[in-house]
Image: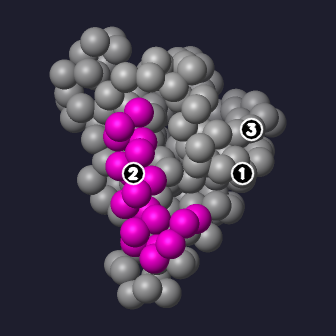
């Protein structure tokens, strides 16, 4: 493919690779929130690729057809590469897990020694929107943070990364979101 899919083509990819209805509903909810955030950033004259955010959010969980674990981002990236999707989409899919994962931590999780940290605004927007959606409903940041703490433990490094991501998004939007 190696060209950028449209929203309709991305939805077709989800169906064709066998994503469940639940994953598709979740992905559509993440997409709606991510696009809303991205549009607000564009209004503030920030350079955000709305199409990349929309398609990246739709496809962020394609790796869930392989696993429900933290490895789903990595597997999703492999699927995206097999489909010939552009690197910018592969990066969103690979890196959306948690609030990004540094190389040393990735190895401990069974991932290759590679930086899965969030670099671009588009990667950050999709990862953040994903953390603010539970199933297909928006949850407030504190609820999301508390769920992370329950799952990972109070002092897990991902907790601080999630807080920093939230603070960055809020600052860029000029207030709480």
Question: What percent of the width, then of the height, locates residue 143?
Answer: 64, 40
Name the mark on residue 165.
2
Quarter where residue 144 is shown: top right
Give the distance between the C-alpha atoms of the residues marked 3 and 1, in whole angstroms: 9 Å
Callout 3 touching callout 1 (CB < 8 Å): no
Label 1 sits on a secondary structure element that is strand
Question: What percent of the width, then of the height, locates residue 68?
Answer: 59, 20
Residue designated by label 3: 135
What residue is at 47 percent from the left and 58 percent from the top?
125
Q: Is residue 69 visible?
A: yes
The magenta region covers 159-177
Task: Please rate how many residues cluster around mark 2, counting C-alpha atoms within 10 Å: few if below 14, some from 14 to 19, many from 20.
Answer: some
Question: What percent of the width, then of the height, locates residue 41?
Answer: 46, 77
- Left/right of residue 51 with respect to residue 94 in the rendered view: right
What residue is at 70 percent from the left and 47 percent from the top?
139
Question: Does the stretch in magenta take in 168?
Answer: yes
What residue is at 41 percent from the left and 33 percent from the top?
159
Q: Earlier in the sequence, mark 2 or mark 3?
A: 3
Name the mark on residue 138.
1
Label 2 sits on a secondary structure element that is helix
Instruction: Tell me: residue 6, above or below residue 95.
Output: below
Q: Identify the main secondary structure in magenta.
A: helix
Task: Please rate how many residues cluster around mark 1, counting C-alpha atoms within 10 Å: few if below 14, some from 14 to 19, many from 20.
Answer: some
Label 3 sits on a secondary structure element that is loop
Q: Is residue 16 visible?
A: no
Question: Does the stretch in magenta take in 58?
Answer: no
């Amino acid at each position: 493919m190696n060209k950028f899919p449209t929203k309709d083509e991305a939805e077709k990819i989800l169906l064709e690779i066998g994503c469940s209805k639940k994953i598709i509903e979740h992905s559509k909810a993440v997409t709606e929130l991510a696009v809303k955030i991205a549009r607000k950033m564009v209004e503030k004259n920030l350079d955000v690729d709305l199409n990349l955010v929309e398609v990246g959010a739709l496809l962020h969980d394609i790796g869930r057809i392989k696993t429900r674990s933290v490895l789903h981002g990595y597997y999703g990236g492999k699927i995206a590469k097999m489909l010939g999707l552009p690197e910018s989409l592969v990066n969103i899919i690979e890196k959306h897990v948690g609030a990004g994962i540094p190389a040393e931590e990735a190895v401990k999780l069974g991932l290759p020694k590679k930086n899965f940290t969030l670099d671009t605004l588009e990667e950050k927007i999709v990862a953040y929107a994903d953390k603010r959606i539970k199933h297909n409903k928006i949850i407030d940041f504190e609820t999301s943070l508390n769920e992370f703490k329950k799952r990972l433990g109070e002092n897990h490094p991902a907790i601080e990364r999630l807080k920093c991501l939230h603070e960055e998004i809020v600052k860029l939007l000029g207030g709480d979101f």
